[in-house]
Image (cartoon, grey):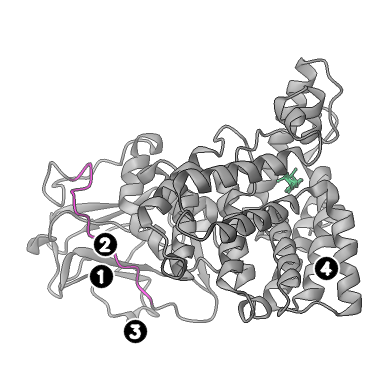
Amino acid sequence: MEVYYQLPVLALDRPVPKHVLGRRGAISLNSNASLFGGRSPRQLSKRRGAISYDRTDQTALFICLLDMRLTGRGIIIKSEKRGGTKLWVDFRLLHNQSGVGCVSGKRHRQHLSLQRYLHPIRGFSNSSALPTGPVAPPPPPQRTLGLLDQQYYGQASVMLKRVASWNFDIFLFDRLTDGINKGETLGCVLQHLFHKYGLIELFGLDPLRFHKFAGLLQEYYYTRNPYHTSVHAADVTQAMCCFLQEPKLAQSLTSWDILLALLGAATHDLSHPGVTQDFLIKSNHYLALLYQDGAVLENHHWKLGVCILRESGLLSHLPVEDRLCFEGRLNSLILATDISKQREFLSRFDAHLKNDDLSMNNGNDRHLILQMALKCADICNPCRPAVISKQWSHMVTQEFFQQGDMERALRQEISPLCDRHSNDMASIQTDFISFVAEPLFTQWAKFCKSPLSRCMLGNLQENKRYWSGSAP
Ligand SMILES: Nc1ncnc2c1ncn2[C@@H]1O[C@@H]2COP(=O)(O)O[C@H]2[C@H]1O
């Protein structure tokens, strides 16, 4: 199987000096990757990779690596001439397996073009485009995150082209965008999807108001939560996009449905405090009092979603009756994510499946299906590929244990699953998959028989085998 690395992209702030390029306008590499430059893609099958540059855009390098394991932190590009200049291409992001794009069987000829930057990249700006002499390895990651992200913005935009892929790695995307705009991952995904579905034009949305809305969204997700952060919201929004692409939905959903689905996903956990409703009730939290102990978190998420919609003015140009109807539908969509109501929700949905009476032409039925889709998107992490799913498992377990530590400190009874001394991640995951995720996705697959549903159930079973210890 050919394995192509999704290379981080490297942009230069001025054309590559002629003396660096080889005879054919390419660059040979002197590295453990033993790459040869200047080969045309058709020769790639015999070569292990190529780096060449686009004559029309001499600040862009095209890099393609084949089926190799990179050691160290990157490669040094060395001009073909003896003792020539060297260029450091950093592969640190690649060492995260999720950065690998597997292309089993088919040739992935697409090169990743590089982004030209309007301003010089830090670290290259006060020297020639290519540093002379041996290139010192870059400083430790934490100091170069900004530089790394500056280099990889182009990679983020390449990833967004595959936003409807179930294997989309939100964690890689978050790293690629975070350093540039201080964690606007959710805003980036939502903005891309709004353009993908033409919602800006269809609803006459003001780009500045959208930008303000996205900024408020980001602001009202707490970064200190191990799990309930804007990255979770971005993941749920991306999952919702995958469901909206399902033929059974795509052919019938209206633009209002799509607007509701995306905004519902983006706002569904707004200002989540990282603790459960029971904790809020036990500690007499004002939210529990405000919402009379009923769907406290979900009502809070929804109310805040309405507040930032109104504060940003995103929909303020629409007729008031449309806005109020939208806010009401947003409420019932977000309230559907209350996991404590899942059993009754599934029995209701199951009755429809048995009667086969759901019609995509019926607005109420479409709304019920969107509720089901958001429920699935909200807890889809066990259905993601293992390397991504395990990261979510770790985060959600840490959030449970963090709550248990607080309850222990407050001398309160420790909530189920939250005592780190009597619970373990594997059993929490096995039970969650068996008793919560599996029933939901099994029912979703009955309604939406598709390759995606089969893929999700397959990942679910694989992850269940892993956590239950029955995986080989
Ligand atoms: N992988 C998981 N393991 C255990 N619980 C989970 C997992 N993913 C989601 N959840 C729980 O499912 C809940 C859905 O609603 P919340 O997002 O409020 O909180 C979520 C978590 O408590």
Q: Is residue 22 magenta?
A: no
Name which of mark 3 and mark 1 comes first in the sequence. Answer: 1
Q: Which labelled disc corresponds to residue 37?
A: 1
Label 2 with label 1: CB-CB less than 8 Å? yes
Q: Indicate the quadrant where residue 169 lies.
A: bottom right
Image label count:
4
Name which of mark 3 and mark 2 comes first in the sequence. Answer: 2
Q: Which labelled disc corresponds to residue 42?
A: 3
Q: Could you tell whether 394 is left or right of 346 in the image?
A: left
Secondary structure state at the residue bearing disc 2: loop
Secondary structure state at the residue bearing disc 4: helix
Between marks 3 and 2, how big is the CA–CA gap?
19 Å
> Where in the figure is residue 123, as x and y percent of width and height?
22, 42
Crowd around label 4: few <14 · some 14–19 · many ≥20 (10 Å): some
User: Magenta residues, as a range?
Assistant: 110-124
Q: Could you tell whether 48 is left or right of 446 in the image?
A: left
Q: Look at label 3 and name its amino acid.
A: Arg
Name which of mark 2 and mark 1 comes first in the sequence. Answer: 2
Majority secondary structure of magenta residues: loop
Residue at image x 76%, y 16%? 409
Q: Which labelled disc corresponds to residue 277?
A: none
> Where in the figure is residue 254, as x and y percent of width and height?
59, 74
Front one among 253 and 279: 253
Between marks 3 and 1, how big is the CA–CA gap?
13 Å
